[in-house]
């Protein structure tokens, strides 16, 4: 589970951002000034920083400058009420990876966060095949068998299974699955993932009601088990 630190001095916006990220199953840390946020970052080492520019005690510019001077390469997404190009350029030149101007869409912000987290992760090798119990799956030919007989899987089911297997034993959130398998940045519900997992369990598991391989992590997402 990725950890996000939000440094924002507007209490209502800070709560909205924290609630939105927690809903997407991120671990969230918050601070209302730059100095407190800097200390949280040093002590808890989050995976991504959402950073307002106009902060008390230490500005967002100064936080960014200090982190980069110390060689800390955490992805930084800046929030700014300033629309001028010069302000955006200064933030990016100081080492920010992306920015969003207020007011902004929470969905757009979430999509940008996911993109930054993906870029920060080391590349993963997707498996060419998967074998377990009496099931054999070839992701190169998009063919699967169970007990030696052809198994009818949809393209999305192949892709979902391949992603989960590549991340085992890590938990993959529903938001990540939607983003990487369906490419949906603006989605109304996560039931799409749950429906596809349920269908895969019927096709693959010996007992779909007690799955051994497609494991639910309640409130977060799914992981591939042994």
Image: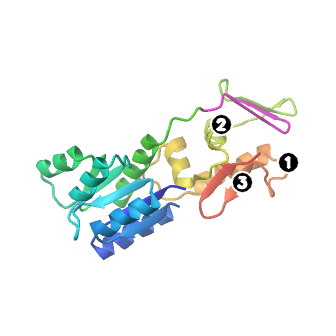
Query: Which residue is the extreme one toward the right?
Result: 147
Tell me what residue is drawn at x 29 percent, y 67 percent: 35
Residue toward you, 225 or 72:
72
Give the number of the disc on residue 112: none
- Kindly identify which residue carries mark 1: 206
Q: Is residue 177 magenta?
A: no
Q: Is residue 132 magenta?
A: yes
Alpha carbon separation for disc pair 1 and 2: 18 Å
Residue 2, horizontal then vertical, whole percent? 50, 55
The residue identified by callout 3 is 215
What is the C-alpha distance between the residues marked 3 and 2? 17 Å
Give coordinates of residue 24: x percent, y percent: 50, 60
* Labels 3 and 1 touching (C-beta < 8 A): no
Label 2: few (<14), some or many (≥20) within 10 Å?
some
- Give the number of the disc on residue 158: 2
First of labels 3, 2 by sequence position: 2
Distance from Cα at disc 3 to Cα at disc 1: 13 Å
Mark 1 near mark 2, Cβ–Cβ under 8 Å? no
- Would residue 74 appear left or right of 78 to someone viewing this image? right
Query: Which contiguous range is marked in magenta?
Result: 126-138
Towards the viewer: 173 or 72:
72
């Amino acid at each position: 589970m990725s950890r996000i630190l939000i440094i924002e001095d507007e209490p209502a916006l800070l709560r909205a951002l924290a609630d939105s990220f927690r809903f997407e199953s991120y671990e969230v840390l918050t601070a209302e000034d730059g100095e407190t946020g800097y200390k949280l970052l040093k002590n808890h080492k989050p995976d991504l920083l959402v950073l307002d520019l106009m902060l008390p005690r230490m500005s967002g510019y100064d936080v960014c400058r200090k982190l980069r001077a110390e060689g800390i390469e955490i992805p930084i997404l800046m929030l700014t009420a300033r629309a001028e190009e010069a302000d955006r350029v200064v933030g990016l030149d100081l080492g920010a990876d992306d920015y969003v101007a207020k007011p902004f869409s929470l969905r757009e912000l979430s999509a940008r966060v996911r993109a930054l987290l993906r870029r920060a992760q080391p590349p993963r090798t997707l498996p060419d095949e998967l074998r377990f119990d009496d099931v054999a799956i070839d992701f190169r030919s998009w063919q699967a068998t169970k007990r030696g007989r052809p198994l009818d899987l949809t393209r999305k089911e192949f892709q979902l299974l391949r992603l989960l297997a590549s991340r085992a034993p890590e938990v993959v959130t529903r938001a990540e699955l939607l983003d990487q398998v369906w490419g949906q940045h603006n989605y109304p519900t996560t039931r799409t993932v749950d429906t596809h997992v349920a269908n895969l369990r019927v096709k693959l598991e010996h007992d779909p009601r007690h799955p051994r391989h497609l494991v639910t992590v309640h409130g977060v997402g799914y992981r591939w088990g042994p």
